[in-house]
Image (tube, rainbow, N blue to C red):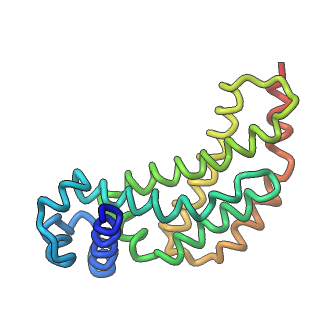
Amino acid sequence: MSLTTKKALAASLKKLLEKTTLDKITVKDIVQDCEVNRQTFYYHFQDVYALLEWIFVNEATKVISNNKTYDTWQQGFLQAFQYVEQNKTLVVNAYHSIGREHLERYLYDVVYKLLIDVVNEKAEGMRVSEVDKQFIADFYKYAFVGLMLEWIRTGMKERPEDTIDKLSKLITGDIHRALLKYEQ
């Protein structure tokens, strides 16, 4: 029942985001649309931003969960772009509101999880400290998320496949070369 209620609240927020930005949506708006009371909302979420974060974590994380290896990272990142594109109104309205921090934090978290697995895979058999592997994953995380945020900011005009193709050409082999520079 709890998951069903969360999904219903999420559907209501997504529906409301089709019409307005996140900072203009209240808990009252969501519970009215969902036909539950405020107490039900607050039983599950602290505020509207917590609900937004739950949506991102529960929907989009599934998108890349099976693509966290060196050979499949492009597919995982492409699927993240496609999720954003398929949920354009939700993402754009979150991006253009004070909820942007939640969107950015979500993207950084998801991309880091993808990249740290890739870095660890490529570092197998090498003597590279965890701190250095985390630094490499962070470096690429900021580049990848920066590209995605700029794509969102400029209206998502470029096809995700084109962006991933350019990115793949640019960094093929770079993670391994970076690890070699940090090998002890």
* Residue 102 rendering spot, x and y as whole percentages: 38, 53
State whether residue 131 is above or below residue 76. Answer: above
* Residue 122 rendering spot, x and y as whole percentages: 82, 40
* Residue 71 rendering spot, x and y as whole percentages: 82, 56
**Residue 28, picture quadrant:** bottom left
**Residue 96, picture quadrant:** bottom left
Q: Residue furthest front?
A: 1
Q: Residue at x 81, y 34 (%)?
A: 123
Left or right of residue 96, residue 117 in this image:
right
**Residue 150, picture quadrant:** bottom right
Q: Residue at x 59, y 46 (%)?
A: 142
* Residue 31 rendering spot, x and y as whole percentages: 17, 71
- Of the pair 104 and 153, the residue shown nearer to us: 104
Query: In which quadrant of the rendered image does the C terminus lie?
Result: top right
Left or right of residue 93, residue 144 in this image:
right
State whether residue 96 is above or below residue 133. Answer: below
- Of the pair 154 and 43, the residue shown nearer to us: 43
Left or right of residue 83, residue 36 in this image:
left
State whether residue 119 is above or below residue 35. Answer: above
Q: Residue at x 80, y 51 (%)?
A: 70
State whether residue 104 is above or below residue 35. Answer: above
Q: Residue at x 12, y 63 (%)?
A: 38
Query: In which quadrant of the rendered image does the N terminus lie?
Result: bottom left
